Amino acid sequence: MTAQPVIENLASQFAPRTAEPDWLGETRRKAIDQLQQQGLPTPRSENWKYTNLRSLHRRNFRPGLQATLAPDQLLPLSTDGYSFLNGVVHEQHPVPGLDAQLVSQALADNGDQLAGQLSALVSYKTHPFAAMNTAFFEDALVINVRAGQKLDRPLMLEFISARAEEPALICPRVLIRIEKDAHCEIIERYIGMPDAENLVSAVTEVHLAQGASLDHYRLQEAAPKETCSHLMVVHQGGDSRLHTHSIDLGGRLVRNDLHSWLCAPGAHAQLSGFYMAVDSQHVDNHTRIDHNAPHTTSKEDYRGVLADQARAVFNGKVLVAPDAQKVDASQSNKNLILSGKAEIDTKPELEIYADDVRCSHGATVGQLDEEALFYMRARGIGERTARALLTFAFAEELLADIKIPDLREYVESRVAHRLPDHDRLGDLV
């Protein structure tokens, strides 16, 4: 058993939920037992080599702590969807025609079916934050896009973290099922109120059926003293299409795990990510794409901007299974370092067990182009503004791929706001 006080403290607060079915109660009990046995990972684990969770070991977090928001704290980005405050539903504005339910209602309507799908992809046995989430999640959301349905507007899921009387454990959970030939856009926005010091452990499970497609956006704007983990696992059927956009701007310590299984011919996954870390932020992105069938394709492009004493980690793995011939996979990680004290540890990986494939990967770490800076300064642009423009241009190559105009403009404004002379950028970009 682990001796980490943070885990023992959480285990002492675990209690059965009498309103839930026996199978879910048993799953929660197994998850908390597993969490106690595993504990939080340490740098001795290869997957956590560059991310140390030592700062959490003696923290006390309380599950289920509620908070309130003042009217002047309402969020500027809104559309149809659901808002959760400290893990509990806060507002609901459903997309017309979309089958979306809180897990309590889904259990009442079709609990037997849900039993085979909740945690089918995310295993609490292998990932400690999955175990934490499984044991303590509150108002999980179950989304089902029916066969052939094409949603004409994005679904917004806002997960707000606010200060309570003590630091809270917040466990957002989403189960997404997209049936044959259906399509939707989903935005998951994680935002922390400035004074929050919570631990956010989020899980998203996605099932894409034959011909289904999903554009998924995750925008993370946690508070400066918050720790955030997000685990997303996707199972893709034949001819399915997945495009993820992962944007990390906030948080003190951030860990993201994104795993896609391409399980039938024609499946395609495109993973796009941008992270911007300043001060002493730490952002860790681990991705994995499993090509388990022939004639599957994937493309991955992650970019990072690091300043001050910030640190980032990128580990991207592409695995091609035996007999998964005619696979086409590419992976790229590019990083811009703006300070001599900033650091990136990048490790793109290919693991190939088939011989008729086309796979590539690469990583770059560099600074701003001095020739470009000289060119801009020669034309009357100040050095700080020139540096900001070049940094923004580096980010924009990826941000321009965001297909929702309001969301793209919002993210661009947040990125620009973190750059020097940001008040001048609006006139120049």
Image: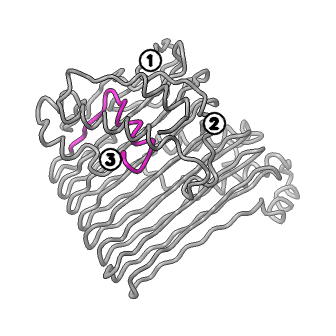
On the image, numbered disc 2 is attached to which residue?
252
The magenta stretch spans which residues? 123-144
Q: Closer to the N terminus: mark 2 or mark 3?
A: 3
Residue 168, placed above or below residue 325: above
Front residue of 54/149: it is 54
What is the secondary structure assignment of the residue under circle 2? loop
On the image, numbered disc 1 is attached to which residue?
65
In reply to whether residue 129 is colored magenta, the answer given is yes
Circle nearer the viewer, 1 or 2: 1
Bin the neighbour count of mark 3 within 10 Å (Cα to Cα): few under 14, some 14-19, many 20 and up: many
Q: Tell me where residue 142 sits by quadrant.
A: top left
Tell me the amino acid under the disc marked 1: Leu
Residue 7, given in percent of the width and then of the height, sits at 49, 32
Q: CA distance from mark 1 to mark 2?
A: 21 Å
Bin the neighbour count of mark 2 within 10 Å (Cα to Cα): few under 14, some 14-19, many 20 and up: many
Front residue of 426/253: it is 253
Tell me the amino acid under the disc marked 2: Arg
Residue 54, placed above or below residue 137: below
Q: Residue at x 85, y 56 (%)?
A: 379
What is the secondary structure assignment of the residue under circle 3? strand
Examine the rendering and report whether any part of residue 188 can be seen.
no
Q: Closer to the N terminus: mark 3 or mark 1?
A: 1
Q: Residue at x 22, y 32 (%)?
A: 101
On the image, numbered disc 3 is attached to which residue?
205
Q: CA distance from mark 3 to mark 1?
A: 24 Å
Residue 54, given in percent of the width and then of the height, sits at 63, 39
Q: Is 335 left or right of 62, judged from the image as shown?
A: right
Residue 11, given in percent of the width and then of the height, sits at 42, 28
Front residue of 375/316: it is 316
